[in-house]
């Protein structure tokens, strides 16, 4: 009798062990938690303090619930935390400079007008501090959106040529850290032009700031068409910027508000590469 009882216990024990280690579904064998990473960089025309930076997962240029976000620190640096690793390189990063909130370290004063900067999705990297958001990266993003450039390198080459930069210039680099005054001056002028169109491009409510993508892209197309005039400094350059800002303001009122351009090349009529 004792022998039979021991045999039954052995069979039951074997079944329990097999159930725990076999093909049953009661215990998962692998974690389903997605891997996460962080994305770090700086935001500038001059380094911008207190800018809102976020991963724009629906392409509307404004911060929505569930999008990783951060505020740039006292040096213009930002870090987006807990980003799904699969999202890196698939969505653009946007930075919003906010009137009377964001400080430009070029002047150490708050920006007079709000404006939006971004960088192309394909340029976003998990490499520490490689994600520099600037007017240059913003222009490159819109150039890539046209579909007229096969690679980022082609877009950078075209933009650098139009700005009179040396061949091979990395237009996504931190021109502040590199002391590249030509790029820095052009970026300052571009940011000034972008801010001058705040009333046409941006709206705000008690809880959020909205961006009219149609008009934003029309603005960026106009800046691109006049990019050779944007790089200058001095009184003549400022006169040209004021004239361009005025004509842009008038033209943007003729762009219907609403959905983004279906074909981005319609916003860029300045001889963009075909």
Image: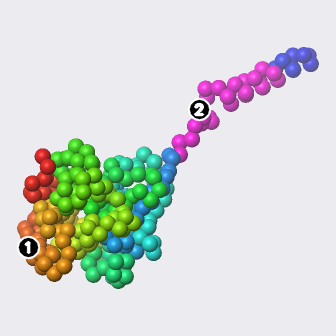
Q: Position of residue 261 (x, y in %)?
A: 16, 55
Q: Which residues are magenta?
A: 9-33
At horizontal 20% and vertical 75% (from top left) the residue drawn is 233
Image: 163 above or below 103: above
Quadrant that contains the N terminus: top right
Nearer-the-camera pick, 143 or 241: 241
Image: 21 above or below 265: above
Q: Quadrant of residue 20?
A: top right
Disc 1, disc 2: CB below 8 Å? no
Q: Position of residue 68 (x, y in %)?
A: 42, 59
- Tell me which numbered mark, 1 or 2, is placed earlier along the sequence: 2
Secondary structure state at the residue bearing disc 2: loop
Mark 1 lies on residue? 247
Secondary structure state at the residue bearing disc 1: helix
User: Can residue 159 be found in the magenta stretch?
Assistant: no
At horizontal 27% and vertical 48% (from top left) the residue drawn is 153
Nearer-the-camera pick, 211 or 17: 211
What number of labels is visible?
2
The answer to whether residue 64 is seen in the rendering is: no
Mark 2 lies on residue? 25
Specify whether 259 is left or right of 107. left
Frontmost of labels 1 and 2 is 1
The answer to whether residue 174 is seen in the rendering is: yes
At horizontal 44% and vertical 57% (from top left) the residue drawn is 39
Q: Quadrant of residue 25?
A: top right
Q: Position of residue 199 (x, y in %)?
A: 19, 76
At horizontal 19% and vertical 56% (from top left) the residue drawn is 161
Q: Which mark is residue 97?
A: none
């Amino acid at each position: 009798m004792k022998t039979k009882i021991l045999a039954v216990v052995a069979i039951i024990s074997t079944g329990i062990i097999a159930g725990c280690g076999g093909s049953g579904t009661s215990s998962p064998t692998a974690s389903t938690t997605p891997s996460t990473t962080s994305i770090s960089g700086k935001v500038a025309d001059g380094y911008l303090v207190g800018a809102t930076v976020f991963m724009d997962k629906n392409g509307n240029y404004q911060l929505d619930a569930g999008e990783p976000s951060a505020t740039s620190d006292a040096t213009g640096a930002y870090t987006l935390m807990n980003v799904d690793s699969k999202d890196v390189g698939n969505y653009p990063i946007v930075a919003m400079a906010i009137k009377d909130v964001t400080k430009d370290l070029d002047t150490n004063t708050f920006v007079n007008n709000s404006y939006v900067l971004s960088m192309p999705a394909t340029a976003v990297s998990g490499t520490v501090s490689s994600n520099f958001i600037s007017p240059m990266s913003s222009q490159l993003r819109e150039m890539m959106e046209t579909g007229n450039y096969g690679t980022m390198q082609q877009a950078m080459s075209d933009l650098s040529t139009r700005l009179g930069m040396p061949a091979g210039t990395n237009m996504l680099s931190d021109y502040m850290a590199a002391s590249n005054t030509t790029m820095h001056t052009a970026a300052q002028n571009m940011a000034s032009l972008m801010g001058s169109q705040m009333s046409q491009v941006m709206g705000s409510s008690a809880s959020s700031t909205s961006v009219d993508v149609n008009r934003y892209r029309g603005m960026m197309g106009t800046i691109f068409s006049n990019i050779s005039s944007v790089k200058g400094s001095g009184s003549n350059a400022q006169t040209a910027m004021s004239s361009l800002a005025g004509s842009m303001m008038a033209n943007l009122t003729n762009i219907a508000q609403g959905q983004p351009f279906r074909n981005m090349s319609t916003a860029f009529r300045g001889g963009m590469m075909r």
